[in-house]
Amino acid sequence: MGIFQSIVNGMTWLLNNLYYLTGSIGIPSYALAIILLTIVIKAALYPLTQKQMKSMLGMQQIQPKIKEIQEKWKNKDPKKMQEEIMKLYKEHNINPAAGCLPLLIQMPILIALYRSLFTFPYENPAHATFFWLQNLTDKDPLFILPVLAGVTTYLQSKMTTMSNDPTQKMMLYTMPVFIGWISATVPAGLALYWVVFNIASIVQQYFINKQNLPLKGEVGGK
């Protein structure tokens, strides 16, 4: 048995046990089990996502200074420009690559959940429904979850996007469309996971932004 198959089996085991937990409280539901699974994974990734979100907010806060450096050195000495920007990151304890790690860790989780749901051994298929969905293994026929996945992805990205960065502005609009399209092609249970994860991330980012809001004027200068 390969390592990845072990991860898939572990995901199936965890989802089943969370389903048993929902049954023990009198509301057996695989959809609720997926929501609980999302909360468990979100809690496990909390230290990484917290660092990622703070770095992204920090990038947003020091953007005026980055722009100043670019205007000063871009045409004179590009190497000096990069050195000054990296120095600025170091001064404010910002890791521009911090946003990649949580996503890289999430990828095997998403793939494992996809593989698990695709052939999930439901003990009671009647408990695999979710409002308008007949089965969480099927695609969302009304595209409600894919739309929510796209919208919540947009809202989360909007909270940290730098308005004067063309690349980030492009990603702000293209990534939600991509996520929405992907969510329409996979089991609805996976789309549900993505929506709940996004909502939790939005709440987390809101409190980080609120906590760090006074720093914007200090970092950007007056």
Image (cartoon, grey):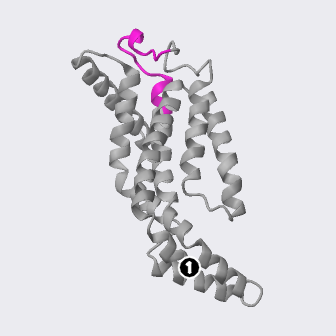
Judge whether 29 appears above or below 56 on screen.
above
Q: Is residue 59 left or right of residue 78?
A: left
Q: Residue furthest front?
A: 222
**Quarter-of-image position of residue 128:** top left
Quadrant, the C terminus: bottom right
- Vertical side of 181 occupied by 50: above or below: below
Q: Residue at x 40, y 53 (%)?
A: 207
Q: Among all residues in the image, which is located at the extreme left?
A: 24
Query: Which picture quadrant has residue 70?
Result: bottom right
Q: Is residue 67 above or below residue 37?
A: below
Name, please, the residue furthest toward the right: 75
- Location of residue 97 in the rendering, given as x and y in whole percent from the top left corner: 52, 66
Residue 1 visible somewhere in the drawing: no
Q: Is residue 104 visible?
A: yes
Quadrant containing the N terminus is top left
Residue at the disc numbered 1: 222
Q: Secondary structure at mark 1?
A: loop
Crowding near the residue tagged with mark 1, few <14, some 14–19, many ≥20 C-alpha atoms within 10 Å: few
Q: Position of residue 28 (x, y in %)?
A: 31, 16
Which residue is found at the position 46% from the left and 81% from the top? Answer: 91
Amino acid at dot 1 = Lys
Part of the protein shown in magenta = 114-131
Residue 142 lies within the magenta run = no
Residue 79: x %, y % from top left:
67, 86
Identify the residue at horizontal 53%, vertical 84% (top origin): 87
For residue 115: magenta?
Answer: yes
